Image (cartoon, grey):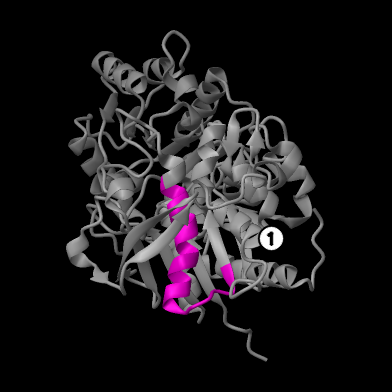
């Protein structure tokens, strides 16, 4: 008997190629496309930011009225399509709230002061849009705090009517971002005042949108199994570990997949030479090209280490290049290697990397977003460093495995789920893993990789071939989500008992 096909609405603040600030946008696009390929009716709703060209969109219907607090905001709705999905992507257009640069803020103003109202409009607007389209989803899959009001609305406002049987799934992409606002902002939500306490919004800092979403969603997911376990601990729970432990029976880690069409060394047009695990000769060509592009000595004998990352503390840059204590100086000064870093981020980190680059002839830093260069780095580097403090899933280590660029990672979140530690005795493994994040641990593990490069080159060759064969397909992850959607629907209908 064929599996029932579902009507699924993704409510999100990001989706590639229209709007992206991090991995959330990649995940929503890839999952939507795969669910669509598997026969589900998947649609997406997000804000129409200033960066989304309205000239490339199609207007849908008339004005859309969205109640917020005691007022009603009037919006336009536009439509487009993802390249690999059948269903439409809807954009809620409100010039005052969304017609500005930035998704959540700008470099000067990292968080817009009216973000609660902006994303409350998205959450409530999702319901009004479905009503206007006369298309009611079986499940609403919401992503992080910007859409976390949706599960609250389902239980506080939609117990009767067209959404009475609609389930909810909330994916936590990064628990450290929770949507915390002053209590006085609650008046902007489309909810009765008493729900501030009864629906789980109340926190020491005022309003916590993600906390309320966790209270009310039928099913909770994270983007890797290890991260699902980690966030139930005080170390990684960001103050919500107790709540997440209570919701543990309904919390699931589903590992993100990756796009093997875009990130494929056999067909990639951004790299100097294509190659495969059966013929690795092209990797040496890419290494030479990378060294030349970055102004490094072209030397096939020296290992090239790389990072492509946001330059922020979460990615381990405090331990790597913090003034007076970071390990990057020692790595480049004491070890026979070359090092390449691509990314943008916090001003202190950019300034410190520039200062180190001036003093270290084997370090090159590109403070920019450069997608073609990112592909060349993955193809040309020998090792890829990811010393993240925490990493809900991570994609760069998956790309690196596919390109035979051995990852060096802190054992956390999705990094722990995707990289198998090297066994010096047998040559088994797909990368190098360390357990405690300190500057010394980073230095020692990079040193371990360097010694393996020079002393056990046969292990490097075998590990590369093994790494390039590893796969993290989206089809398996999408089938797991479809199963969880059905559980959420059953719970909403009362066929599965709510345990909280």
Residue 491, relative to residue 307: is it above or below?
below
In the rendered image, residue 308, in percent from the top left (x then y), is placed at: 37, 38
Does any portion of residue 232 appear in the rendered image? yes
Where residue 191 sits: x, y (%)? 58, 51
Q: In the visual, does 90 lie left or right of 5?
A: left
Quadrant in the picture for residue 392: top right
Locate the N terminus and report the quarter of the image it occupies: bottom right
- Where is residue 37? Give x, y as percent: 46, 78
Instruction: Give the extent of the magenta segment.
Output: 118-139
What crowding class fits label 1: few (fewer than 14 Cα within 10 Å), some (14-19), or many (20 or more)?
Answer: many
Residue 440 magenta: no
What residue do we see at 58% from left, 36% from top?
Answer: 207
Task: Choose top left, top right, bottom left or bottom right for residue 250.
Answer: bottom right
Magenta segment includes 131: yes
Residue 299 left/right relative to 388: left
The residue tagged with tag 1: helix, strand or loop?
loop
Task: Please say whether residue 27 is visible from this viewpoint.
Answer: no
State the residue position of label 1: 218
The residue lying furthest to the top in this view is: 324
Residue nearest the viewer, comparing 492 with 202: 202
Q: Position of residue 300 (x, y in %)?
A: 30, 37
> Does residue 463 appear left or right of residue 247 in this picture?
left
Q: Which residue is drawn at 44% across and 8% down?
A: 324
Q: Quadrant of residue 3?
A: bottom right
**Dominant SS type (magenta):** helix
Of residues 484 and 291, which is closer to you in this image?
A: 484
């Amino acid at each position: 008997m064929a599996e029932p096909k579902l009507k699924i609405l993704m409510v999100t603040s990001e989706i590639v190629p229209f709007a992206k600030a991090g991995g959330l946008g990649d995940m929503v696009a890839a999952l939507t496309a795969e669910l669509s390929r598997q026969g589900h009716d998947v649609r997406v709703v997000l804000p129409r930011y200033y960066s989304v060209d309205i000239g490339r969109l199609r207007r849908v219907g008339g004005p859309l009225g969205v109640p917020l607090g005691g007022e009603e905001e009037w919006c336009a709705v536009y439509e487009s399509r993802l390249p690999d999905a059948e269903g439409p992507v809807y954009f809620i257009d409100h010039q005052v709230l969304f017609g500005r640069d930035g998704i959540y803020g700008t470099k000067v103003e990292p968080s817009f002061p009216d973000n609660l109202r902006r994303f409350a409009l998205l959450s409530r607007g999702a319901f009004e849009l479905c009503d206007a389209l006369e298309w009611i989803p079986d499940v609403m899959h919401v992503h992080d705090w910007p859409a976390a009001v949706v599960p609250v609305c389902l239980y506080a406002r939609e117990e009767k009517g067209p959404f009475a049987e609609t389930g909810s799934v909330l994916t936590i992409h990064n628990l450290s971002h929770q949507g915390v606002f002053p209590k006085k902002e609650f008046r902007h939500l489309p909810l009765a005042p008493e729900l501030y306490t009864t629906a789980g919004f109340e926190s020491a800092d005022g309003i916590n949108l993600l906390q309320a979403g966790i209270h009310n969603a039928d099913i909770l997911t994270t983007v890797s199994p290890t991260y699902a376990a980690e966030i139930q601990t005080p170390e990684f729970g960001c103050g919500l570990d107790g709540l997440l432990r209570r919701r543990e029976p309904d919390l699931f880690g589903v590992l993100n997949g990756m796009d093997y069409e875009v990130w494929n060394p056999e067909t990639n047009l951004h790299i100097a030479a294509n190659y495969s695990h059966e013929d690795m000769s092209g990797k040496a060509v890419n290494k030479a090209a990378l060294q030349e592009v970055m102004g490094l000595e072209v030397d096939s004998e020296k290992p090239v280490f790389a990072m492509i990352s946001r330059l922020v503390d979460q990615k381990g840059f405090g331990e790597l290049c913090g003034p007076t204590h970071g390990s990057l100086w020692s790595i480049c000064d004491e070890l026979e290697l070359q090092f390449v870093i691509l990314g943008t981020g916090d001003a202190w980190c950019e300034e410190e990397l520039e200062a180190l680059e001036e003093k270290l002839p084997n370090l090159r830093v590109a403070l920019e977003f450069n997608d073609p260069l990112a592909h060349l780095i993955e193809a040309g580097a020998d090792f890829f460093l990811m010393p993240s403090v925490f990493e809900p899933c991570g994609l760069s280590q998956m790309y690196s495995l596919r390109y035979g660029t051995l990852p060096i990672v802190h054992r956390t979140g999705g990094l722990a789920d995707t990289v198998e530690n090297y066994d010096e005795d047998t040559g088994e493994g797909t990368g190098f893993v360390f357990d405690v994040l300190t500057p010394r641990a980073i230095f020692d593990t990079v040193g371990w990789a360097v010694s393996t490069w020079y002393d056990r080159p046969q292990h490097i060759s075998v590990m590369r071939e093994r790494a390039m064969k590893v796969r993290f397909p989206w089809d398996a992850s999408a089938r797991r989500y479809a199963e969880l959607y059905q559980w959420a629907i059953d719970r909403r209908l009362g066929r599965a008992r709510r345990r909280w």
